[in-house]
Image (cartoon, helix red, strand yellow):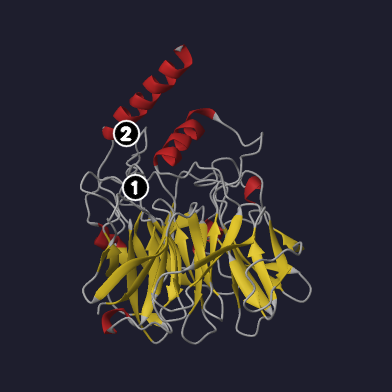
Amino acid sequence: MPILRNLAAASLTLAALSACGEVATLPVESGMGPQPKLPPPNTTMIPTVNTAKAVGWIAGAQPIPANGLAVNAYAADLDHPRWLYVLPNGDVLVAETNAPPKPADAGGGFKAWAAGIVMKRAGAKTPSANRITLLRDADHDGVAETRSVLLQDLNSPFGMALIGKQLYVANADAVLRFPYEPGQTQIKAAGVKVTDLPAGINHHWTKNLIANADGSKLYVSVGSNSNVAENGMDIEEGRAAIWEIDVATGNKRLYATGLRNPVGMAWAPDGKTLWTAVNERDELGSDLVPDYMTSVQDGGFYGWPYSYFGQHVDTRVTPPRPDLVARAIVPDYALGPHTASLGLAWSGGTRLPAPYASGMFVGQHGSWNRDPRSGYKVILVPFSGNRPDGPARDVLTGFLNESGQAQGRPVGVAIDGQGDLLVADDVGNVIWRVSPKP
């Protein structure tokens, strides 16, 4: 068929052009830490496309834990598990979810078509299951023997937070509230809308949730609608930001802005300082721009789209805003260029041994815009008090096979009721459990 032949030819052309693109001149580690190396931008006519093809795990295969750790499948045969939330009784909630359908006016063209190919190759084009599944390990053997659908027929759900007896869920377009009783395995009550969230095109669709210590506030992360506002700032209204919601009234306000795609959120040990993991912009070369994690200041502006990592101006953005660039906050800790750092969890309560006992766990979903690839692993950024202290440590690797294909891709991370680390793998469709090695 001519159409299929043309698509195949175009796909091969895209791959060939991408293969001729630039390559990294620095190791990933150079783009990590509080003072990453930031070489000059290296833009090309065709951006580097180097996505690992999603193939899944063969029987008996699993990720590789770091020294002193062990790994096993806590639950398998899930449907694109992206995010995790551990309830006070130890039950684990899993958002089985994917991007919502694009609206008719979402735009197209070569770039959108190419992005679709990249997403399909990476395993991110499957329909969304639109449910939250409850997993229970009642006998504490490290494997969930009970599985039930807690909520279904949602709209690309992602973040979850329990306040008292109310379970809050962030859909792609709104925050909903559901009644919850401890031990409950299915919620039949309809959700009550707390507030709408920026939706529509949803270039970045994941909306995460975290509650403050007294349950009076919810914080919602909302990613941008583009790479660097190439379609104008009108469609970025309320995006690239973290919102604060008053739980009692549902009123919301912008808490921090200029965060291209904040996803994971966690509280520092003081319980008062909010941290987030942010995916930075693409198409400036394999060495730029590093993703990062940072403490979040109320009213803070972090640069997007006008600058990156403080005052490094992105000349692609017009018109420029030197006034905003001048007040852009430098992030606390770079996580490497294009690592797609999504998951974020404080280690509090973990029983993992000393090198992994204090810090932020980060799920790095893996690059598409870097040669060679970066991410595709779980790391720990060690902390001393409320601040990062030292280079990151690998916790779970081996998600890429010897052929560079993705057996799995880590996303959400969480500490379970026994103090073990859980990792959502949305390509392998597994929840991995990392525990101390016997």
Q: Quadrant of the C terminus?
A: bottom left
Query: Percent position (x, y) of residue 397?
Result: 27, 61
Is residue 249 placed above or below 372 in the rendered structure?
Answer: below
The residue that appears at 58% across and 40% down in the rendered structure is 231
The residue that appears at 56% across and 69% down in the rendered structure is 300
The residue that appears at 32% across and 81% down in the rendered structure is 352
Query: Percent position (x, y) of residue 185?
Result: 62, 69
Q: CA distance from mark 1 to mark 2?
A: 17 Å
Residue 348, picture quadrant? bottom left
Query: Which of these two is toward me, 25 or 220?
Result: 220
Query: Which of these two is toward me, 174 or 307?
Result: 174
Query: Percent position (x, y) of residue 437?
Result: 25, 77
Residue 41: mark? 1
Specify whether residue 303 is in view: no
Provide the residue designation for mark 2: 18
Amino acid tagged 2: Ser
Q: How many marks?
A: 2
Q: Is residue 411 left or right of residue 28?
A: right
Between discs 1 and 2, the one toward the N terminus: 2
Residue 289: mark? none
Specify whether residue 417 is in view: yes
Is residue 339 placed above or below 123 in the rendered structure?
Answer: below
Badge 2 element:
helix
Residue 350, picture quadrant? bottom left
Q: Quadrant of the N terminus?
A: top left
Query: Percent position (x, y) of residue 400?
Result: 28, 51
- Number of other residues with Cα within 10 Å of mark 1, as a class: few under 14, some 14 to 19, many 20 or more: some
The residue that appears at 56% across and 31% down in the rendered structure is 108
Is residue 232 placed above or below 436 in the rendered structure?
Answer: above
Badge 1 element:
loop
Residue 167, picture quadrant? bottom right
